[in-house]
Structure formats: structure tokens, C-alpha cells
């Protein structure tokens, strides 16, 4: 049971980390498609820099050993950021395909948080 939980944790955490790093980098370099999408959603382009930096810092926080309180804050930040993205897509009546990425990252965040080992809990 413990081994299964550890495997689930690491699979979810690695995929979550890859998703957050890749989207964070895309936001930091402000790809044209990202800037256009943020404008469509009603957010200023500089918001991409803020989100990108926090995503990368959040990934570092959940991957490094120790610092369980920082991990809790990182998971909470991911949850609020991603749920906010989902509600933004709902608010602008975005196409259903645009919900897939945020929903997947939200599920991975919850799974990673739920199955994290005892030494990573606060």
C-alpha cells in the first residue's frame, strides 16, 4: 500500500511539475499565442510573467526535500491558480478544448498533494 501510494505520488508530481514548468516557461517568454490568449481572457500581458515565475518557484518548492510548510503553500498556490484559470475560461464561455489542460493540472495537483509522503506533509 505504501509503495503504491509513493508511485502514485511520484507519477502525479512529475507530470504536474512538467506541466507547470512547460507552461511557466511559455508564459515567461511571452509567446505570441499566450499573450493573445491572455488578452482574450481579459488579463494584461504582464500577468504572464507573474504566473510563470510563481509556477517555476512552486515546482521547486514541491520537489526539494524538507520545507513542508512551503510545499503546502505551493500546492495551495497551484490550486488557486489553476481553479482560477478554469473559472476564467467559464466566465468568457471559452471552447471546451481549452478546459483540458487546466483540469488535468488541477487533478494532478490534488493527487500529488493527497498522496505525498509523510515527510513532505506539514
Image (cartoon, rainbow, N blue to C red):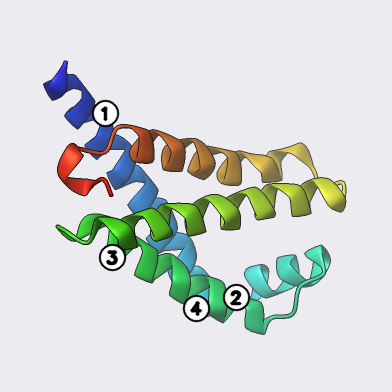
Q: Nearer the viewer, mark 1 or mark 2?
A: 1
- Neighbour class for label 3 at 10 Å: few (<14), some, many (≥20)? some
**Which residue in the structure is indicated by mark 3?**
60
Q: Position of residue 99 (x, y in %)?
A: 67, 42
Is label 4 in contact with label 2 (beta carbons under 8 Å)? yes
- The residue located at (38%, 62%) in the rendering is 21
Is label 1 in contact with label 2 (beta carbons under 8 Å)? no
Q: Quadrant of residue 95?
A: top right
- The residue located at (75%, 37%) in the rendering is 96
**Residue 108 badge:** none
Q: Position of residue 116 (x, y in %)?
A: 26, 38
Q: Earlier in the sequence, mark 1 or mark 3?
A: 1
27 is higher (above) or lower (below) than 100 = below
Residue 57 seen anywhere in this rendered image of the structure? yes
Give the CA separation, mark 4 to mark 2.
6 Å
**Which residue in the structure is indicated by mark 1?**
8
110 is higher (above) or lower (below) than 23 = above
Q: Earlier in the sequence, mark 3 or mark 4?
A: 4
**Which residue in the structure is indicated by mark 4?**
28
Give the CA separation, mark 3 to mark 4.
16 Å
- Neighbour class for label 2 at 10 Å: few (<14), some, many (≥20)? many
**Secondary structure beneath disc 3?**
helix
Q: Position of residue 93 (x, y in %)?
A: 87, 46
In the image, 103: left or right of 9? Answer: right
**Which residue in the structure is indicated by mark 2?**
48
Q: Earlier in the sequence, mark 1 or mark 2?
A: 1
**Secondary structure beneath disc 2?**
helix
**Secondary structure beneath disc 1?**
helix
Amino acid at each position: 500500500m505504501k509503495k503504491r501510494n509513493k508511485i502514485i505520488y511520484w507519477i502525479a508530481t512529475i507530470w504536474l511539475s512538467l506541466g507547470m514548468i512547460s507552461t511557466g516557461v511559455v508564459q515567461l517568454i511571452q509567446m505570441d499565442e499566450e499573450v493573445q490568449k491572455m488578452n482574450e481572457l481579459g488579463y494584461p500581458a504582464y500577468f504572464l510573467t507573474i504566473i510563470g515565475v510563481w509556477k517555476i518557484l512552486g515546482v521547486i518548492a514541491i520537489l526539494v526535500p524538507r520545507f513542508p510548510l512551503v510545499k503546502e503553500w505551493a500546492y495551495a498556490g497551484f490550486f488557486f491558480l489553476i481553479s482560477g484559470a478554469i473559472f476564467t475560461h467559464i466566465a468568457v464561455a471559452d471552447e471546451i478544448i481549452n478546459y483540458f489542460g487546466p483540469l488535468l493540472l488541477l487533478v494532478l495537483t490534488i493527487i500529488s498533494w493527497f498522496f505525498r509522503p509523510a515527510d513532505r506533509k506539514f
